[in-house]
Amino acid sequence: MSTHHEERELTRNVQATLIPHGDPYTLDKGAKVTITHRLGGNFTVMTLNGMYRISAADADSLGEDDSQGPEEDCDNAGPADVDSIRDALRSVFDPEIPVNVVDLGLIYKINIDEEEGKRVANIDMTLTAPGCGMGPVIAEDCKGKVIKLSGIDEANVEIVWDPPWTQDLMSETGKMELGLI
């Protein structure tokens, strides 16, 4: 993760997501943005009009390398298990909080089930606040990371609210990253 702020000019129109509402928004070619975070391959940017998330797939619009980092070496790893799914989810971030969803304590349950001959990862996660419009975006990021793992045919991510999230659910690592301990 990088938090060094860099101003850039968009090289093309890009579909972004308005933070914290989660609404799609087109940022126009030539717009000036300031990259505030690089989180899990995605970018959090500020403009004069607000904060937005630009996905890793659109990194080129910022003049960045569009690769999302090294892919999982699935050939030698064998089929994914709960631990490898949890590790993959450590590369998913709420764009406003520079701590991954696992260390934030947002992942409540991970199961791998056999459904109609397919290995399906079923994940329950929560959000730090019920009104967070970024929930569907974060859930899709989780799904995208998990579906890339060896031996996972499908991934379902459900946002749940019970139990409600509190800072007590954060890992020690997450609390340290946020300066809470």
Image: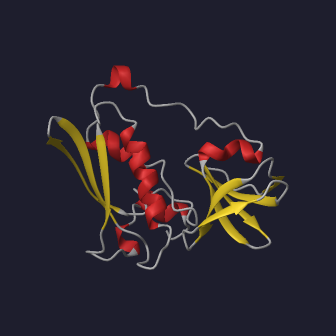
Total labels: the figure holds: 0
Decide which of 72, 20 is in the foreground and name it: 20
Give the residue displayed 39% in from the left and 56% down from the top. Answer: 102
Give the residue displayed 65% in from the left and 46% down from the top. Answer: 58
Question: Residue 40: horizontal and vertical position, in percent?
Answer: 55, 48
In this rendering, is residue 37 above or below 21? above
Give the residue displayed 33% in from the left and 43% down from the top. Answer: 85
Determine whether, in the image, residue 102 is placed left or right of residue 27: left
In this rendering, is residue 79 above or below 105? above
Give the residue displayed 29% in from the left and 36% down from the top. Answer: 152
Question: Residue 22: horizontal and vertical position, in percent?
Answer: 54, 68
Determine whether, in the image, residue 170 is placed left or right of residue 115: right
Question: Residue 180: horizontal and vertical position, in percent?
Answer: 51, 71
Please, which colouring scheme is shown? secondary structure
Question: Residue 109: horizontal and vertical position, in percent?
Answer: 25, 57
Which quarter of the figure has residue 19?
bottom right
In this rendering, is residue 106 above or below 61? below
Decide which of 21, 176 is in the foreground and name it: 21
Determine whether, in the image, residue 30 is placed left or right of residue 174: right
Decide which of 170, 165 is in the foreground and name it: 165
User: Farthest top residue?
Assistant: 76
